[in-house]
Amino acid sequence: MSKTEPLYVLRGLSKQYSRGKETIPIFDGLDMEIANGEFMAIMGPSGSGKTTLLNQLGGIDAPTTGEVIFDGRRIDNLGQGALAKWRSENVGFIFQFYNLMPTLTAAQNVELPLLLSPVKGAERKKRVATALDIVGIGDRAKHYPRQLSGGQQQRVAIARAIVADPKVLLCDEPTGDLDRTSADEVLEMLQLLNTKMGKTIIMVTHDPAAAKYAKTELFLDKGKFIKKGSKK
Amino acid sequence: MNDFTLVLKNLFRKKLRAILLLFSILSAFLIFGALGSFYKVFTAGVEVAAADRLITVNKINFTVSLPLAYVNRVRSIEGVRNASHASWFGGYYQDPRKQVQTFAIEADTYLAAYSELVMPDEQRKAFMETRDCLLTGIDLVDQYGWKLGDSVPINSNIWQKKDGSSVWEFTICAIFDGDKETVPANYLMFHYDYFNENLAFARDKAGWIILNSEDPAMNDDISKQIDTLFANSQAETKTSTESAFNKAFLQQMGNIGLILSSVIGAAFATILMIVGTTMVMAVSERTKEIAVMKTLGFRTGRIFRLVLSESLLLALLGGLIGLGIAWALVDLAIGPALSGFLPGMRLTADIALLAIVLMLALGLITGILPALKAMNVAIVDALGKN
Amino acid sequence: MFKQIAALTKLNLRSIPQRWGMSLATVFSVALVVLVLMAFLAMANGFKATLSGSGSTDVAVMLRKGAQAELNSGISLAQLRLIREAPGIARNADGNTIVSGELYVIVDGLKRTTLTDVNLPLRGVEPDALVLRQGLKIVEGHMFGSGSNELIVGQAILREFAGFDLGSEVRLGTATWKVVGVFSTGGTVFESEIWADAGSIQSLYQRGSGYQSVRAKLDGADGLKALQDWAENEPTLNLDIITEKEFFSGQASGITNIILYMGWPLAIVMAFGALAGAWNTMYASVEARTREIATLRAIGFAGFAAFVSTLVEALLLAFVGGLVGSVLAWLIFNGISASTLGGNFTQVVFAFEVTGEAVQSGIVMALIIGLLGGIIPSIRAARVPLLSVHGG
């Protein structure tokens, strides 16, 4: 993969939901490219289609029409099984409410994606420990989610997202449930992952302060980009 | 950590709930193990019956005796390898309410017919040579604390001796056991000659005739020949295989098999409902977690297997504990307590095997619905429920 | 407080449909436990009622000492003659003692439901036998003739077993016998018997002049004692003398106990299984209502009201289960005719009897399951933290 080629290419992306007889279009004929190494914040009011867009990028929802091309490969037409495999190898997800398994410890939560990879034994332990160290909560490995604060839980979630070394991190309101200090810590961490580890990050957020951490800010309204801002 | 860790963690997510479910599954398998063992030993007579063994009884009823002369006439029929006879003695030891099965037998031919009865050679010899010998089942030796050489008075509630007494004196000179555990060894036998000579009335009668055919294929033919031979005589006969005879006798008690299987059925219906509904609820509680796992890249097949394994594990755990308790109960408590009239009651390997099959079936049935439900969780919908 | 409890209970019961799966499972699992228990009780009660209803207190049964059952016993003609002159026995209008020397032998019959051979009792009786069984009526045909090869059969025999229909011929030994009458005794064990003239049975079974048991009508309340004392001092007699009532209850107790010893433990083990189910269901109920309970408590409802309302839900589910089980038991089992091998080595026909007492036991058992299954979840309901109003 050359540096100049975009990581994501969206062509003529349309998505509509049917509710009873009514059809509700989310977006219609969206085109966009996302460069490798990007840190993009997608902003916009509720119902603007932010999360739906993120779902298309993550391969957990298929567009009605149009193409999603990742790293030169179409993913919108893959089967469920192939998509699952693709996700486990290429994407890390970070959610607003962390979505950790309450029955598993921090370390086990982080280890979860590795159950899908050929990584075994000592190597697996090392990867988990490294991921926890990167997010700065190596000392909480044995704790259960309910024993951790929101910020700590989100760090575990980030560790889980990066442990399988995916190319892209998709974040859905990652600071939506956190206080300002914790939010800033999480955002700084994402920034670090972007600059130091080269992870492409796409983040949906309401929060303009959070968006400031990104390289690119996009505003989505009624399924259309209305403003594009780039700082660097 | 591996998939099994996930299954285990999910199963015991709510410990009390899991324990209650285990408890309820345990109860059904306890019932299955205990009743299964009971039924098995109850019908053991049918199973231990030898294929070449036939029983000839009076056509009026098997409690009505036959003329002794019939034995020799049966012997002369072609295809009959061996014939013997036995009579019901109606014995009891000290307490008239506690019967001890006792038979007066023609010794050499009877032991030849029942080759599964075993004893040391010198005891066999002693039995053959001692007129008043009481050939004693090993279970009774244990029960009454008898030993070889003891003089034992056995009362008969039917037969009186010439002197008017119903007390018959015997010496224990041989102790027999079955060559398999299911062969009963809870009765007494003694020489017919000793019985017949001392009888006050009804002498020269045989209770029933036992015979061995040369080949089980000839059984039907021999039965017909015998019954035809004695047709229109003063005592008509009815001949059947030992297993058919035993089976018919058990059926006289009523349909025990139906009663027992109904109870087991009810117990299983109970846990099917309880476990089934609880598993459905347990899985819908974690719809979101399943969606997250799918997002991480867990495939639907693997999710299906994880949930199904959970209910299988639950069924196996509960079932094995229940089976274990049933084993302890049957082999260590009920079995010994009932050894007097149902010897050899044990939780056998085939019952355990059937129980394990039932556990797997229970796990699959209660797991399939939740597993399908988990498999079909739509990521987008589930994660939308924030 | 009562108002609070009523209000919460109402709210509670209204939420049951939200958990209909588990609630229904609880109801039916309790119902199955009760059904199993009632089946055994109905069986035991039916058997016991048949046998204990058979015996009369003013009839003495005499057997040879230690015989236990009529089948094993033997009494000679000389002994019977002696007994006919014994004290304590009532006399008829002609001044003769009311005594019947009887024989009890077994013949094969065919059970209609399974088509297998079964042991049926063939009783040889003397004329006084009819006086000694109160309520005996010939309902079809006529009485056997004295000394004839004629049989009369009880109604239960006709119902359950083939081969002894009115008018049919039965070959026993060398002779052919004819069924000439059907008798009823109002549901007692005698209806499971076939009767013939004692003399005919003696010759069929080569019993010479011997009998197996003697029945005699007792002369008043002291009759039994007088008879027993007299027999004790007669050197040629060696008898056990008890009332017929005692005789049959002794026979009933063995099998009744076996049925009860099996039924109760089985029902109790099953009850533990259902208990676990009820407990689970009630936990789910409390969990589903945690926020609601916390809200109500925040408003000012007492924890005790939450406790009682939850317990009421558990008891109600169990009670409905008990009721369903009882009704099912009554519909399925009540009155069904069955037969088993009784104390005399012959078939006793009896009808399952779902008694009020059994229903009571079933309902009590159901309520115990509800109480034990509901108590801990109820305590938990009472202790729901107020902060749960915020959900989560």
Image (cartoon, coloured by chain):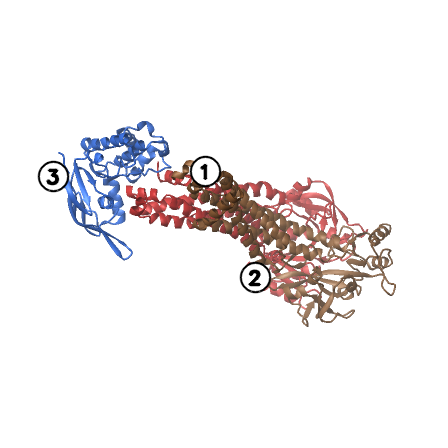
Mark 1, residue position: C384
Quadrant housing the N terminus of chain A: top left
Q: Secondary structure at mark 3?
A: loop
Query: Is the Cβ of the residue at disc 1 closer than 8 Å to that at disc 3?
Result: no
- Vertical position of residue C260 compared to residue A122: above or below: below
Identify by letter the chain in brown: C
- Extreme residue in the top direction: A139
Residue type for callout 2? Met
Identify by letter the chain in blue: A
Q: Secondary structure at mark 1?
A: loop
The image quarter containing residue C162 is bottom right
Residue at point 35%, 40% (across, down): B3
In the visual, does C209 lie left or right of B106? right
- Vertical position of residue A173 compared to residue B106: above or below: above
Mark 3, residue position: A4
Chain that bears disc 1: C
On the image, the x and y values in percent for residue B25 come to 49, 45
Badge number at residue B218: 2
Chain that bears disc 3: A
Residue at point 19%, 30% (across, down): A196
Residue sitting nearer the eye, B344 or A86 = A86
Q: Are marks 1 and 3 on the same chain?
A: no
